[in-house]
């Protein structure tokens, strides 16, 4: 299981910038995501106080296939996301201003290699939902490992090249 915590501002100093976070996960992986929401993008901002109940705050994670046509990064208009692959409501966590969202084992096995995700925050039972972060999910196929090449270096960091003979 992969555990990840992200801290997201509710109020941003620039309405043009939505925080972007990218994830790289294995198709067979699971994810425990904690989303902590702070008042603003000021470094000293405090976590929001979350109250439950009817119409109380909810946090939703949406994952949908990436369709790169008609979209630019960082602030340009996005096209409609189309079909949602997976979504989940977060539960209010024991940490102040936090929601917990879990993606179970094997959920990503049927997803395309590149997906888009977004986190929405709702304060009014669906009437005041706002996207507070988005990013890409890169899904690595099961059984595929990334292996770094092995090289030998001298004491002065000069690579030692081996002759094929």
Image (spheres, rainbow, N blue to C red):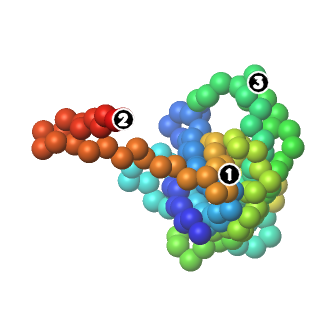
Q: Which tag, 1 or 2, sits closer to the chain's start?
A: 1
Query: In what element is the residue under mark 3?
Result: loop
In terms of depth relative to the viewer, which is nearer, 41 or 145?
145
Vertical comparison of 26 with 159: above or below: below
Q: Which residue is mark 3?
A: 69
Give the CA separation, mark 2 to mark 3: 46 Å
Left or right of 49 in this view: 103:
right
Of the 4 image quadrants, the one containing the C terminus is top left
**Quarter occupied by residue 29:** bottom right
Q: Which tag, 3 or 1, sits closer to the chain's start?
A: 3
Label 3 or label 1, whichever lies nearer to me, is: 1
In terms of depth relative to the viewer, which is nearer, 106 or 146?
146
Query: In what element is the residue under mark 1?
Result: loop
Of the 4 image quadrants, the one containing the N terminus is bottom right
Name of the residue lying farthest toward the left: 155
Q: Position of residue 148 (x, y in %)?
A: 42, 47
Left or right of 142 in this view: 96:
left
Label 1 or label 2, whichever lies nearer to me, is: 2
User: Residue at point 65% right, 71% down?
Assistant: 92
Q: Position of residue 126 (x, y in %)?
A: 82, 55
User: Residue at point 12% right, 39% down?
Assistant: 156
User: Residue at point 65% right, 65% down?
Assistant: 30
In terms of depth relative to the viewer, which is nearer, 102 or 9?
102
Q: Which residue is mark 1?
A: 141
**Quarter occupied by residue 48:** bottom right
**Quarter occupied by residue 64:** top right
Name of the residue lying farthest toward the bottom: 94
């Amino acid at each position: 299981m992969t555990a990840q915590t992200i801290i997201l501002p509710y109020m941003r100093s620039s309405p043009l910038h939505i925080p972007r976070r990218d994830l790289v996960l294995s198709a067979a992986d699971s994810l425990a995501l904690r989303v902590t929401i702070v008042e603003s993008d000021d470094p000293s901002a405090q976590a929001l106080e979350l109250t439950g109940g009817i119409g109380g705050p909810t946090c939703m994670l949406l994952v949908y296939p990436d369709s790169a046509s008609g979209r630019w990064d960082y602030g340009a208009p996005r096209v409609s996301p189309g079909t949602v692959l997976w979504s989940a409501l977060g539960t209010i966590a024991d940490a102040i201003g936090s929601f917990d969202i879990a993606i179970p084992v094997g959920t990503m096995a049927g997803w395309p290699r590149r997906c888009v995700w977004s986190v929405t925050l709702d304060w009014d039972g669906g009437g005041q939902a706002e996207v507070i972060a988005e990013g890409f999910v890169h899904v690595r196929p099961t059984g595929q490992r990334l292996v770094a090449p092995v090289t030998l270096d001298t004491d002065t960091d000069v690579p030692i090249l081996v002759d094929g003979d």
